[in-house]
Image (cartoon, rainbow, N blue to C red):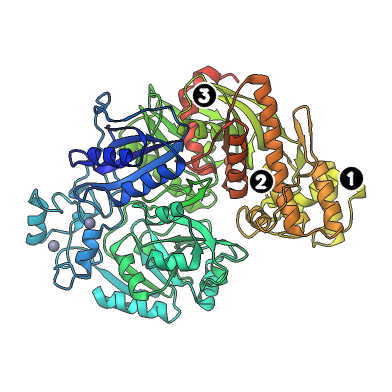
């Protein structure tokens, strides 16, 4: 395998490359290291475990004078590099003054913060050149204090001295501050009554948390809602108030030992949790966890993370136990970032508000990752990663703007060989989300100071993003098919060269197809220049359309009707009245408000309902997630029969078999496992057929369904065993958060397939 790492930070001229050399050679790895326009680029090749070791030690053992601000990495196919060399710097491109992401508090600052003799003892905004807010405080470039929200604070003489002394750790640290001159915290009750300031505010907030209160805490990119994660009562109250029935909530821990005690971790998960980016990492709960079951109900996993700002550090350490730390918003709205907003929008949700007077210029949610197939796969790429560019293997002739899709939206701006993806914007459902979306586009164009020559949006005529594009960029607007964008995003981050074709499996919930139906279970041959749709799930109807997302029993009914017709069995029918059932069947038969789909995501939902697991979902993909987790309890390798008819994957034999098994009392977990096995078998079967016909061995897996660990890991290994080269996501999410990257690529090549 090959591991590619792009490091940004203080890594040039500080002995970093010799350190990398020694580390690589010591582990018997071949490859090279070189400085480039973004920082340091490393490529090493060897066995996977050695590469993991390299990655872990890169972060833990680097020379003390060097500093890592970010470490983007992917595991790729090896190129047969031999020996190890320190290569000359890449001087082909100009050096880019990248805007850095917000960087988690460094050890030096933490030491000072806990040192009673330090002048910044217990100062919750301590930072230095190597850590602190960046992206969320910048108003415009260049990155100088006067262009950040720190311009409101005038440095005291001591801070000023540090700022100007070249040998000081705070030399030109723009957010430099101390007790005397910097921002400070204050605790309010929800009515806006000031309760305490400074250290007392922190103490009292912790006291409130200990006593079962919900505290909104202003962090770096927005407010968190926090409460004791071991207290059922308060977690339940938070759910009720936030109108968040069962969607999992993330938990912040005081330290890695406590996370180890509550969850099962492998070493890559542990690395991710402790990494400089400090994302939320989705891991498996232990049976005997002390976390409230309500943190992630009916779910065997939980999102965990470590503190990344001094204020979070102080709160969580004083608390001494895990805290729920979930984005402060009402479901579907963007995260709250301003005080005024907090008092208004969090009224009725939080009991107290711990805020501070350093304004957040732009919101940025926590990032979420998951380790699958021994790789770190982003589920949400935001704080800690944004706005670092994804480097692409060719140069864009003109700037390209990508408007994303609809769910988990991000936008992207492509300039030369760099693609800047925005922070997580969310689902474009509510007026606030739409406003945030428009703001983000304007800001990105402003801050990078470009005018896009090409603008790309999704093919879906009703997406807010599409309509936004039509309204604001009628000239040069290109509409690109959703699943084509998914596969493109996967290809580009895996550095597939121009001209090469791959077999793409795009499995997700919904996306608008070129035939105007809803796609989502698609097999395509894809190159950067276009795609051919070769297979898809056998089409079926979704009675009530979008409603099927929240009510998987609708999909279940449709699958059963398609399979059995009017002889549909009474038994696995959903828990709704006979009348509603026959009404829905009538809708399906007549095609009334029942769009046709080939969605794989919905198929998972439907099966989940048919086996009696989940008929109504309170958050997106809940039915499918529970089906996946249930399947891990069974061992079987058996598969159900399926038929591939011309280009249609006929799932009816699968449904038929499932219904039979269910009636004969086979456990639901066995059915769930066999269903997963079957989907994998279908993929392998089609991949083999296409390989025989075309010689293509590279298989790209993209779309929201590939957040499913069983499927992604299973397919990754099986494809590999059979001589394929599987590609999965490691830089952008497989879900629609990664669509904008694919759209950039499509925009670049648009003149070629314009007339597809
Ligand atoms: Zn620091
Ligand atoms: Zn000061
Ligand atoms: Fe999608």
User: Percent position (x, y) of residue 320?
Assistant: 37, 74
Name the residue beneath numbered marker 1: 565
User: Percent position (x, y) of residue 445?
Assistant: 35, 36
Q: Residue furthest bottom?
A: 211
In the displayed structure, 750 sits above or below 165; it is above
Lower position in the chain sequence, tag 2 or tag 1: 1
User: Percent position (x, y) of residue 470?
Assistant: 51, 33
Q: Horizontally, is 227 left or right of 445 in the view?
A: right
Mark toward the viewer: 1 or 3: 3
Q: Horizontally, is 575 left or right of 277 in the view?
A: right
Q: Secondary structure at mark 1?
A: helix
Give residue 618's mark: none
Q: Could you say which is closer to the camera, residue 323 or residue 26?
A: 26
Lower position in the chain sequence, tag 2 or tag 3: 3
Name the residue beneath numbered marker 3: 528
Lower position in the chain sequence, tag 1 or tag 3: 3
Q: Could you say which is closer to the camera, residue 236 or residue 289?
A: 289
Q: Horizontally, is 596 left or right of 402 in the view?
A: right
Name the residue beneath numbered marker 2: 601
> CB atoms at circles 2 and 1 under 8 Å apart?
no
**Marks 2/3: CA–CA distance:** 25 Å
Q: Secondary structure at mark 2?
A: helix
């Amino acid at each position: 395998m090959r591991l590619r790492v792009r490091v940004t930070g203080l890594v040039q001229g500080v002995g970093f490359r010799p350190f990398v050399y020694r580390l690589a050679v010591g582990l018997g790895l071949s490859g090279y290291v070189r400085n480039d326009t973004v920082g340091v680029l490393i490529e090493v090749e060897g066995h996977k475990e050695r590469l993991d070791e390299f990655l872990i030690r890169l972060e833990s053992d680097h020379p003390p004078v060097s500093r890592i601000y970010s470490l983007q990495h992917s595991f790729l196919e090896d190129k047969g590099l031999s020996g190890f060399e320190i290569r000359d710097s890449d001087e082909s491109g100009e050096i880019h003054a990248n805007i850095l992401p917000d960087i988690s508090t460094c050890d030096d600052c933490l030491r000072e913060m806990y040192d009673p003799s330090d002048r910044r003892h217990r100062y919750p905004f301590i930072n230095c050149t190597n850590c602190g807010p960046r992206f969320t405080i910048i108003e415009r470039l260049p990155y100088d204090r006067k262009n950040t929200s720190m311009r409101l604070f005038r440095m005291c003489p001591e801070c000023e001295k540090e700022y100007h002394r070249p040998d000081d750790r705070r030399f030109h640290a723009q957010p430099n501050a101390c007790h005397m001159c910097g921002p400070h915290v204050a605790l309010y009750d929800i009515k806006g009554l000031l309760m305490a300031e400074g250290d007392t505010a922190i103490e009292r907030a912790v006291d409130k948390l200990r006593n079962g209160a919900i505290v909104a805490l202003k962090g770096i990119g927005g407010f968190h809602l926090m409460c004791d994660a071991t207290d059922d009562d308060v977690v339940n109250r938070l759910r009720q108030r936030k109108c968040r029935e069962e969607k999992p909530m993330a938990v912040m821990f005081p330290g890695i030992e406590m996370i180890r005690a509550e969850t099962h971790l492998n070493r890559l998960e542990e690395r991710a949790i402790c990494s400089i980016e400090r994302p939320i990492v989705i891991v498996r709960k232990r049976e005997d966890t002390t976390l409230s079951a309500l943190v992630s109900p009916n779910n065997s996993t939980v999102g965990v993370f470590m503190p990344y700002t001094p204020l979070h550090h102080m709160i969580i350490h004083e608390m001494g136990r895990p805290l729920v730390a979930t984005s402060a918003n009402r479901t579907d709205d963007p995260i709250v970032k301003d005080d005024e907003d907090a008092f208004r929008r969090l009224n009725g949700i939080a009991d107290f508000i711990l805020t501070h007077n350093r304004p957040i210029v732009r919101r940025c949610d926590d990032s979420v990752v998951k380790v699958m197939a021994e790789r770190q796969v982003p589920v949400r790429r935001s704080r800690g990663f944004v706005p670092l560019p994804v480097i692409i293997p060719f140069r864009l002739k003109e700037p390209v703007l990508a408007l994303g899709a609809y769910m988990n939206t991000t936008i992207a701006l492509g300039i030369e060989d760099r693609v800047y993806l925005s922070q997580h914007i969310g689902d474009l459902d509510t007026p606030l989300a739409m406003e945030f979306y428009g703001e983000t586009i304007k800001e990105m164009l402003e801050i990078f100071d470009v005018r896009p020559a090409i603008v790309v949006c999704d093919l879906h005529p009703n997406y807010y993003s599409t309509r936004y594009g039509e309204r604001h960029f009628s000239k040069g607007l290109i509409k690109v098919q959703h699943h084509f964008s998914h596969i493109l995003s996967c290809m580009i981050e895996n550095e597939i060269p121009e001209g090469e074709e791959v077999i793409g499996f795009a499995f997700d919930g919904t996306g608008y197809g070129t035939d105007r139906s809803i796609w989502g279970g698609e097999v395509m041959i894809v190159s950067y220049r276009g795609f051919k749709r070769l297979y898809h799930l056998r089409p079926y109807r979704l009675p009530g359309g979008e409603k099927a997302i929240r009510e998987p029993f609708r999909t279940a009914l449709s699958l059963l009707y398609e399979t059995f017709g009017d002889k549909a069995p009474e038994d696995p029918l959903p828990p709704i009245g006979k009348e509603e059932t026959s009404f829905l069947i009538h809708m399906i038969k007549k095609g009334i408000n029942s769009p046709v789909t080939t969605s794989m995501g919905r198929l998972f939902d439907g099966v989940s309902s048919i086996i009696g697991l989940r008929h109504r979902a309170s958050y997106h993909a809940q039915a499918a997630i529970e089906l996946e987790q249930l399947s891990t309890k069974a061992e079987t390798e058996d598969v159900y029969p399926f038929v591939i008819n011309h280009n249609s994957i006929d799932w009816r034999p699968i449904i038929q078999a499932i219904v039979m098994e269910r009636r004969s009392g086979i456990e639901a977990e066995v059915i769930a496992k066999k269903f997963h096995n079957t989907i994998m078998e279908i993929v392998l079967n089609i991949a083999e057929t296409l390989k025989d016909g075309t010689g293509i061995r590279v298989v790209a897996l993209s779309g929201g369904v590939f957040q499913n660990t069983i499927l992604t890991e299973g397919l990754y290994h099986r494809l590999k065993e059979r001589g394929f080269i599987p590609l999965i996501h490691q830089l952008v999410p497989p879900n629609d958060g990664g669509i904008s990257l694919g759209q950039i690529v499509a925009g670049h090549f648009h003149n070629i397939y314009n007339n597809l």
